[in-house]
């Protein structure tokens, strides 16, 4: 069995990926898994969707296949293609086919970015059929036990949920993700970076003020991911204001007025 890169599918993770739940999402996901229901995770970038899927794959003891969707992604990229190797033609499974055969969790990140004709190949996997039709080989593949489709969707991006056909949308149980509440976000920052809790709380407080700038035109607000990156730099001895500048502010905007407003908030906090 081969994946898109031509390597063997990675085995299930042995070490638990740290995930701090916000509510009942772990139990809900487990129930979806046992009932063979596909799941959509809806929420802003960097709020923990990928970490959640990694955690669930570990908890359920399934391998995880992750596919980043973009508008050039074709059905063949997902399903597979014939390759010419030396003097022979060999079939190579795409990542979706590999996941279906292995009974893996298959995570399609940013599914709305993929073209409709690509997304449509998922349909037969999300209903009672649980099959994948591989036209090029004539194979009708039945999903191995444990196979589950998970997709993510970021409502802040240009493409909208309505860009997905209703017939696609209605195939997914949809879990809403938000940035964690302040005390939990601080706990995550401490766990992921090792900085002092008081410093993590100050960073989270700063993030909340920065998120408030959305009303003043900040298109992307700082995610938990950016907070963790900033804290990791601080933990390695980079001065706090410098770390905030490069890891928290610069990735968000190059508009001078917004950068100025964000810098003021950093200097007020630290
Ligand atoms: P997304 O997939 O939503 O873009 P990620 O799952 O990659 O975001 O989250 C970014 C980072 O934020 C993770 O690598 C992790 O360090 C941290 N993180 C966010 N939420 C959580 C959480 N609930 N538990 C543990 N870590 C989290």
Image: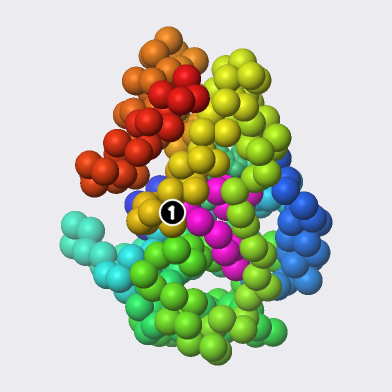
Depth check: 263 or 207 in front? 263
Secondary structure state at the residue bearing disc 1 = helix
In percent of width and height, residue 92 lies at 36, 63
The chosen color scheme is: rainbow
Depth check: 185 or 63 in front? 185
Q: Residues within 10 Å of mark 1 (few under 14, many from 20)?
A: few
Residue range highlighted in magenta: 40-52
Q: Which residue is mark 1?
A: 214
The residue most toward the top is 237
Quarter of image, ligand 1: top right
Q: Is residue 206 above or below residue 221?
A: above
Report if residue 6 is visible in the image. Answer: no
Q: Residue at x 65, y 70 (%)?
A: 174
> Magenta span has 45?
yes
Depth check: 242 or 129 in front? 242
Q: Is residue 100 above or below residue 8?
A: below
Choose top left, top right, bottom left or bottom right for residue 237. top left
Choose top left, top right, bottom left or bottom right for residue 147. bottom right
Q: Residue at x 69, y 84 (%)?
A: 128
| Count of numbered circles on the image | 1
């Amino acid at each position: 069995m081969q994946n898109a890169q031509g390597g063997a599918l990675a085995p299930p993770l042995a070490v638990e990926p740290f995930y701090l739940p916000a509510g009942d999402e772990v139990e809900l996901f487990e129930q979806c898994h046992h009932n063979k229901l596909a799941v959509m995770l809806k929420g802003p970038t960097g709020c923990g969707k990928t970490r959640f899927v990694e955690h669930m794959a570990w908890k359920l003891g399934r391998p995880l296949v992750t596919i980043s969707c973009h508008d050039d992604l074709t059905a063949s990229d997902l399903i597979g293609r014939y390759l010419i190797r030396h003097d022979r033609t060999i079939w190579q499974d795409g990542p979706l086919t590999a996941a279906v055969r292995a009974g893996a969790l298959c995570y399609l990140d940013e599914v709305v970015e993929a073209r409709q004709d690509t997304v449509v190949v998922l349909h037969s996997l999300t209903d009672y059929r649980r099959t994948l039709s591989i036209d090029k080989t004539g194979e009708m593949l039945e999903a191995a036990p444990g196979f589950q489709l998970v997709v993510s969707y970021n409502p802040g991006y240009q493409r909208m949920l309505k860009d997905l056909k209703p017939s696609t949308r209605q195939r997914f149980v949809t879990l809403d993700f938000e940035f964690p509440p302040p005390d939990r976000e601080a706990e995550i920052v401490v766990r992921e970076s090792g900085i002092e809790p008081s410093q993590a709380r100050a960073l989270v407080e700063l993030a909340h003020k920065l998120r408030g700038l959305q009303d003043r035109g900040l298109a992307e607000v700082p995610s938990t991911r950016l907070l963790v990156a900033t804290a990791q730099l601080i933990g390695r001895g980079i001065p706090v204001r410098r770390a905030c500048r490069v890891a928290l502010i610069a990735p968000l905007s190059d508009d001078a007025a917004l950068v100025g407003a964000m810098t003021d908030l950093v200097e007020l906090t630290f």
